[in-house]
Image (cartoon, rainbow, N blue to C red):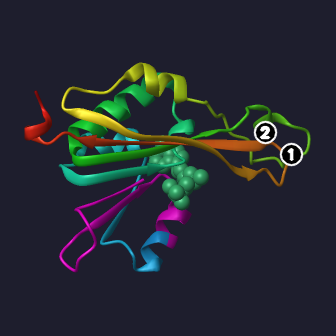
Amino acid sequence: MGSCNGTTTPKDRLVGVDVSRGMVERCRASGQYNEVLLGSIQDILPGLSTYDHIVCLSVLHFLTAPELSLVLARCFQLARLSLTVSMDEVPNNQAQGPDIPAGLSMESFSHIDEAMAFGIPPGWQLVCRKRRLTCVSPLCGDRIHTTVLRYEKLKRSDIV
Ligand SMILES: C[S@@+](CC[C@H](N)C(=O)[O-])C[C@H]1O[C@@H](n2cnc3c(N)ncnc32)[C@H](O)[C@@H]1O
């Protein structure tokens, strides 16, 4: 998950969040981020302040439905201009198949229905919803589709 203050200029800040120490170290080493926080978005989001843009790619399928609602609600509180999320549809049999090496199992939820049911908070609009095939699992051949949702805050002049 990453967030940044507007378009990239030298004074903008790009802050990342990931629960994996290895991913955090790679992101820090990339030099692309001003700061990378180690921890789950469930734990870290409550303590953050606002950002212009929040982007959360291919993480939400790891959350349970109640966690998804809390994370979306907090993102809408923290984002000043836009929120972009992508949600992968990873079949759970990928986590349980006989060819999956030990230690690589995971639980996954396809959350697009929950995200739609969550709705659009007042003062926001859904400007993009796109679903496409993003990868074919090298482990079990599953075809993984991803849906991208982008929400933008309405300008005061657009609110009737
Ligand atoms: C498919 S990768 C996507 C990584 C990155 N967002 C990107 O778009 O390149 C999923 C990432 O989600 C992280 N992750 C899983 N559950 C998480 C959680 N609850 N909070 C924060 N990160 C989480 C994993 O550690 C992993 O790095």
The type of residue carrying mark 2 is: Gln
- Indicate left or right for 145 with 62 as reference: right
Secondary structure under badge 2? helix
Q: Residue at x 26, y 39 (%)?
A: 46
Task: Give the label on residue 20, or none.
Answer: none
Q: Check the image and name the residue furthest to the right.
A: 98
Secondary structure under badge 1? loop
Magenta span contains residue 23 = yes
Q: Point out the stretch of residues depicted in magenta.
A: 1-26
The type of residue carrying mark 1 is: Cys
Magenta span contains residue 7 = yes
Residue occupied by mark 1: 140
Badge 2 vs badge 1, beta-carbon distance below 8 Å: yes
Front in this rendered view, residue 107 or 160: 160
The response on whether ligand 1 sits within 8 Å of label 2 is no
The response on whether ligand 1 sits within 8 Å of label 1 is no
Is residue 78 shown to the viewer in this render? yes
Is 10 rendered above or below residue 158? below
- Indicate left or right for 112 with 82 as reference: right
- Indicate left or right for 126 with 86 as reference: left
Q: Residue at x 81, y 42 (%)?
A: 142
Q: Position of residue 89 (x, y in %)?
A: 65, 36
- Indicate left or right for 95 with 155 as reference: right
Q: Residue at x 61, y 30 (%)?
A: 109
Q: Position of residue 102 (x, y in %)?
A: 81, 47
Mark-to-mark CA distance, 2 and 1: 7 Å
Task: Give the label on residue 94, or none.
Answer: 2
Please tell me in which quadrant of the rendered image residue 72 appears. Answer: top left
Is 61 rendered above or below residue 160? below
Q: Residue at x 72, y 52 (%)?
A: 135
Is residue 20 shown to the viewer in this render? no
